[in-house]
Amino acid sequence: DNFSYPVIQSTYVKEQRVFEGRVRHTFKGWTGNLGVRTKEADRVRGLQDYIDVPKWLLVEGRIAGKINRNMKLTLRGFTEDMQRQPPSVAEDTRTLVWSHRGFAQIKLEGGKDTLAYHVIGSYNRRENEQRTTGITNRNLSSGITWEPKPNFSFFIEHSLDGWWANNGSADYPTLDNFASRSAMVVLGFGWSLSSNTFLSASYTDFRTTNDNPLLLRDGNTRGRFLTLNLRRQLKGDTEVGLTVAPWNYRDRVSDLMSYSATVVSINGSTKF
């Protein structure tokens, strides 16, 4: 790829080269993919002065298949290393870009007849070796959808999300003191009361925790949101609806950010 941009003061990529190879194999209902990719980027200044050519190496893979008739397993991930790092002309010559990135995920999904489910676990890592800095994210989510009757369905989802960080310093506050953890639950249902009347509801409950050494807002929160919808179709492609949504948000550090509100809306639509 070749790029041509107007003259600017900061650096930009003038040309990049990508080389990629991939192997795919199938065995008894399972499929595996393995790929390798290298990337180089020619960077120049706004005055067209040559700067550097950073280089990345990416290795990624994926395996997927059925454990049984009603269950599927998927594993995927990648690792990326910067083999040639861009130099810095500032007083601190350590690079500001990630020298390593890694990602891994396991996903289990399945179901039968009126029930479907999934469980997903993810791991994400970013590192800057020159600055001894790293950020890690772990996420676990699961969900179930159930349809006991043709006119009624129910769902529930739950997720846990956590961040961890370090910058090679033990002085308080450390970078990890600003990393947050959160949990969320979402559930709801959809119900066809008749051929032209529909009722749905959803409820979300989430909370975040944080050491929050600077006592910043939106770092330690709790939210509860309920939304109810009622729709009715009339003759002549006309539809009316009613929405009621009581919401509650609390900031345990800054109470000025907290609020309680109820939204009531009536809407309608028709075709001419």
Image (cartoon, helix red, strand yellow):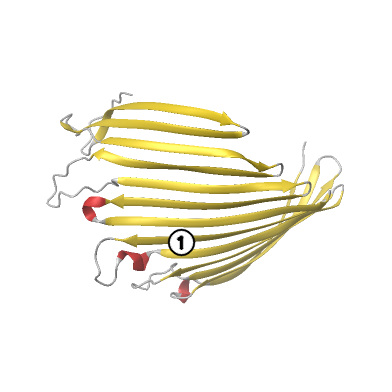
Horizontal side of 192 relative to 206 (left or right) equals right
Residue 80 placement: quadrant: top left
Residue 240's x, y, as percent?
Answer: 78, 51
Q: Residue at x 71, y 44 (%)?
A: 70
User: In the image, what residue type sits under mark 1?
Assistant: Gly
- Assess disc 1: are there few (<14), some (14-19) or many (≥20) residues with their C-alpha within 10 Å of its C-alpha: some
Q: Looking at the figure, which quarter contains the C terminus? A: top right
How many dots with numbers? 1
Horizontal side of 28 relative to 69 (left or right) equals left
Residue 144's x, y, as percent?
Answer: 68, 54
Q: Residue at x 49, y 52 (%)?
A: 122
Residue 73 placement: quadrant: top right
Viewer-proximal residue, 258 or 18?
18
Residue 59's x, y, as percent?
Answer: 39, 37
Image: 33 above or below 92: above
Horizontal side of 109 relative to 25 (left or right) equals right
Most distant residue in the left direction? 91
Q: Residue at x 39, y 56 (%)?
A: 136
Residue 117's x, y, as percent?
Answer: 67, 51
Q: Looking at the figure, which quarter contains the N terminus? A: top left
Q: Is residue 230 visible?
A: no
Residue hosting label 1: 162
Viewer-proximal residue, 90 or 131?
131
Viewer-proximal residue, 43 or 259?
43
Q: Is residue 223 visible?
A: yes
